[in-house]
Each structure stands twice: as structure tokens, then as C-alpha cells.
Amino acid sequence: RLFCAPTRADQPVAMVHPNPVFRAQVLGAGPTGALAALALARAGWQVRICDPLPASALVERNRAYAFSHSSQRLLCQLGLWSSLEQVMVPFRRLELVDLAVERQVGFTSADLGPGPGPATATLSPTAVGWIAQHQLLLPPLLAALAADPAVVLELGSPPVQSSLPPPDLVVAADGPHSPSRAALGIGALHWAYSQNCLTCLVQLRGSANDQAWELLRPEGPFAVLPLGDGIFQLVWSAPARRCRQLESLGDGAFLDALAGALPDGLQPDALLDAPRAYPVGLLLAHRLHRGRTVLVGESGHRCHPVGGQGLNLCWRDVAQLQRLAGQVVAGRLAVERLPAAYGRRRWPDLLLTLLATDLLVRLFSNRSPLLLPIRHLALLLLDRLPPLRQLALAAMTHGPCQLLRQ
């Protein structure tokens, strides 16, 4: 009797399934939404990003952002730093001045310790941070979205119903008045500061082009951010009534008021655009996810602009989202568990950063005789003790949670 080996046709066929394709929808194409879409695409997801505003309206926003090393590290990981570096102005010294106690502390690149993570080697060893104008920052991000084959960019119209299955993840990056957060029924803690922030561009004398200033004044913090060629962006916190008064002044009267607010040696020469004031407040959503949706950036939180922490905190949301999205693609995290994991991992950084900025505003926006000695001692110690200066700068540049892990 002959026994024949089974032919290939007789053998059971193993069904080979391709890797699943994960889809995300991003609502909002500002700096945080755009970066979130690019981060998900780099992690291997198919992304659809939409915004009701056209590109021209998205770009035309008159403000500047301060970027820390946590943001630079993320841009390096996404392969975006080389293109965005061209629109960023580095500052190599940060002057912290308490005008009420007349003490000043300078932070330089020598106060930067090693950053966390494997991308530390990509960090610039000479810059304390960077400044970029919104109108120069957003166009390269939108161009990168348009060029990425994994991204569908829809601007200038509300989201349309797609014939595709529902996305695996919805990223709500639609700002502090987020319609997505409201539609999900997620409440938020709101705290309106008595201060407003007034922003404008000025030509200044007396400061180096690579020097930034954080002025702690009794009426509120005052940031002077270099943009090159003697041009500086002002972020001037003051009582709301005072900001409205400043907005109404003519150019000459405004420059006179500005000269009185700046420390000796800084002299304004020209006002380059119209001052604009806006209210500031603290916002924290009661939760950062519901169902398949996560709140990213200012849809979930907002802090006082003191210390330039706002956009850096939003982009640390994006960094966490990308890490989790990569774990989903690698099969180490179920996609339905991503939103809850994102919420759990972002809470510590959000709470610590919002608490720190709020305490800074409350501690330094006054002339309380009980607090003045404490402020004097704090700045004296910062000035005299390099390790304490390094610790403070690390918290600002890498985030308080990364600091605690070191």
C-alpha cells in the first residue's frame, strides 16, 4: 500500500491578516491639533483633521509662544525640528526680576541639566528656550499635514459625515471653549483671574537680542520675549481696567506707560502693532476622556501665561498621546484602552503645572509685607545656589513630572 504525503492543496491554509489600520479624527487645526495629527500619523495611524476655519484665518493670529526643551524634544522625535527651527528665535539668557523687592536672577544654558529620555543628545546646548510667532509657526505645520499621505486635511468647513467606520480615536483640540467637551457633557473647573493680558510688538533698546525677561510686578507678571532685530513681544499682565486703559492710549502715551513699567535700562523706541488685551484664567476639565474621545491641549486645561508654560503643557499632551498610539500599533495596548490611559498619565503633569503657575501669580502679584521677605529670600537663594537654579529651570523646561522622575 502506498502512502502519499499530502499535497500543498491538502494542507490547511494559515490565514495571514495584515496589521490592523487604526484611524483617528482630530478636531481643531491650531498648533496643538496640527501637531497631534502629525504625531498620530508618525505613530502609524491614518488621521483625518478638520477645522471650520480656513487656513488663512487659522494662521492670522497675533501672538507669540515660548518653547521649552520638552517641546523641542518632541519636535525632534517627529522629524519636524529642522523645519521649525528656522522660525524660532533662541534666547540664551532669561532674566527673572522681582521689581517689588528689587532682586534679579539670571538663568543661562549653564543652568540646564541633562534632559530626560534618549532624545537628549538632540537638544541645543546653548539655548534656554525659543520664541516663535504664531503666523510663522503654523504654516509649516499645515504644510507637513498636507504632505503626509497618512493625513486627510479638511479646513474651512464643519466635519462631514464619512462613509468609513467610526474612528478608533477622536482627539478634541478645539480650544478652551471646546464644543467637543460641551457635547460630551464634560464639566470643567474655571477660575477667572482679576488680571488681563495685553500683548503687542515693540522695538526696545537695552536688551540683547537673545535675552528674555520675566518681570514680576505687583500688578502681575510681565514677559518680554525676543524676536530678533531688537523686536520684542510683550505679554503684560495687569488688572482688567488697567489693560483697557492701555489699549485706548495713543502710541506716544502707550510708550510712556511702558517705559514706566520696564526696569531701568530697557527703553521702548516704537510700537509696532496695536496692543490687544484678553482675559486670562485657569481651566481644568473634570476628566480628559469619554468614550473614544480625548481632550488635548486647551480643550482640557488652561493656565496663566506666567513662565510661558501654556503651549509646552499642551504639547506634552501630544507627546503622551503619541507614545500610547505607538503602543497600540505595536500591540502592547488595546485601542479601546488608550483614552483612559491618556487621562491617567496626564493628570500629574497638569495638576502640578497649573498649581505652580497659580502659586506664582498669587505670590508675586502683590505688595504684601508678609510675602516680601519670602520673595526676597527665594530670589537670593536662586541667585546664590546653582543647584537650586538648575532645579527651577529643569522644572520649567522639562515639566515638573520629568523632574520628579530624575
Image (cartoon, grey):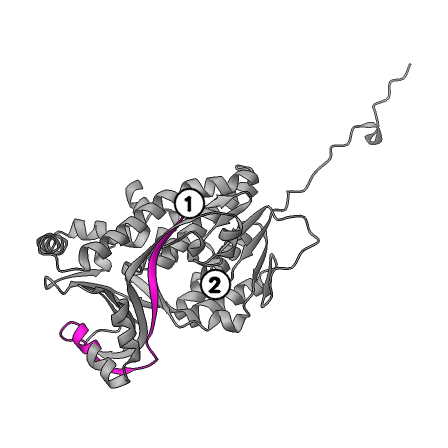
For disc 2, the marked residue is 30
Q: Earlier in the sequence, mark 2 or mark 1?
A: 2
Q: Name the secondary structure under disc 2.
A: loop
Magenta-drawn stretch contains 279: yes
Residue lying at 71% horizontally and 53% vertically, measured from the top left: 163
Question: The N terminus is located in which quarter?
Answer: top right
Which range of residues does the magenta coloring cover?
Answer: 258-285
Q: Nearer the viewer, residue 105 or 249?
A: 249
Q: How many marks?
A: 2
For badge 1, the amino acid type reads His
User: Which residue is the extreme one toward the top?
Assistant: 1
Question: The C terminus is located in which quarter?
Answer: top left
Residue 13 % position (x, y): 77, 32
For badge 2, the amino acid type reads Gly
Q: Is residue 291 left or right of residue 196?
A: right
Q: Which mark is residue 72?
A: none
Residue lying at 30% horizontally and 66% vertically, measured from the top left: 196
Magenta-drawn stretch contains 74: no
For disc 1, the marked residue is 286
Residue lying at 56% horizontally and 40% vertically, measured from the top left: 335
Q: Nearer the viewer, residue 76 or 30?
A: 30
Q: Nearer the viewer, residue 287 or 67?
A: 287
Q: Is residue 386 above or below residue 344?
A: below
